[in-house]
Amino acid sequence: MSVLFRMTHRLRDLVSAVMPVRSWLPSVTEAPVAGPAECTRIASHPAMEFKISSPAFADGADIPVRHTCDGEDISPRLTWRGAPRGTRSFALIMDDPDAPRGTFTHWVVWDLPGDLNELGEGSTAGAQGRNSFGRQGYGGPCPPRGDDPHRYRFTLHALNVPKVGLSKSTRDELAAAIDTHVLGTALLVGRYQRQRVGAR
């Protein structure tokens, strides 16, 4: 019995000697584990949307007379952002899908540098193709008088090649040349209507 008492007393002394060690051990604070929501926020970085716009008119709004055959017939200023990764050049097509005899092409441009993000008003940058008027360059909206408003689509193509390799070509020729090189497209739509002569 006395032996057991001495062993118990000895064990208690050893425990008492070890316990103070905790007072000088550095405290360790575990970093909180991120929950599902935090992980999602860290991993999710959506690419910027490829968009084209114009200071002259909002998407779906009326195109000012200045940019039509009833005005100065000069192209509007266009700006864009969010081009896809790998873009080396741009091509632009403006057309009227509401023309009486089918889609009418007003403007065809290509070989715009990949680091470009706007075309100024009346721009002649890049290679300018032939439009449906039979002219090279821009031809503004000019729907038949009395028609309901026509839509005018400005479609910007981001390409993975620096040059298309065409000269004074048509919209169809451009479409065929860039068919396998398009990384993304951005669309801006404007409207225009001409009144009948003498209408109030």
Image: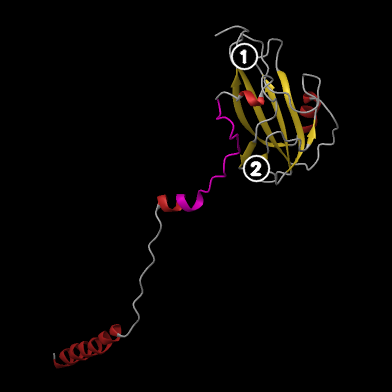
- Image quadrant in which you'd find residue 168: top right
User: Residue 15 appears at what percent x and percent y?
Assistant: 24, 86
Between marks 2 and 1, how big is the CA–CA gap? Answer: 37 Å
- Foreground pick, 59 / 9: 59
Give me the disc on residue 72: none
Residue at x-position 66% and y-position 18% = 97
Query: Residue shown at 76%/28% (left/top)?
Result: 175
Which quarter of the image is occupied by the N terminus?
bottom left
Residue 150 in the figure: left or right of residue 42:
right
Q: Is residue 179 visible?
A: no
Magenta residues, dominant SS class: loop
Task: Please tell me in which quadrant of the rendered image residue 110 appears.
Answer: top right
The residue segment tinted magenta is: 40-60
Foreground residue, 35 or 104? 104
Residue 84 bears which disc, if any?
Answer: 2
- Identify the element where label 1 is drawn: loop
In the picture, measured across the screen, residue 168 lies left or right of residue 44, that is: right
**Residue occupying image coordinates x 80% and y 28%:** 129
Above/below status of 141 relative to 91: above
| Residue sitting nearer the eye, 104 or 50 | 104
Q: Name the residue beneath numbered marker 1.
A: 194
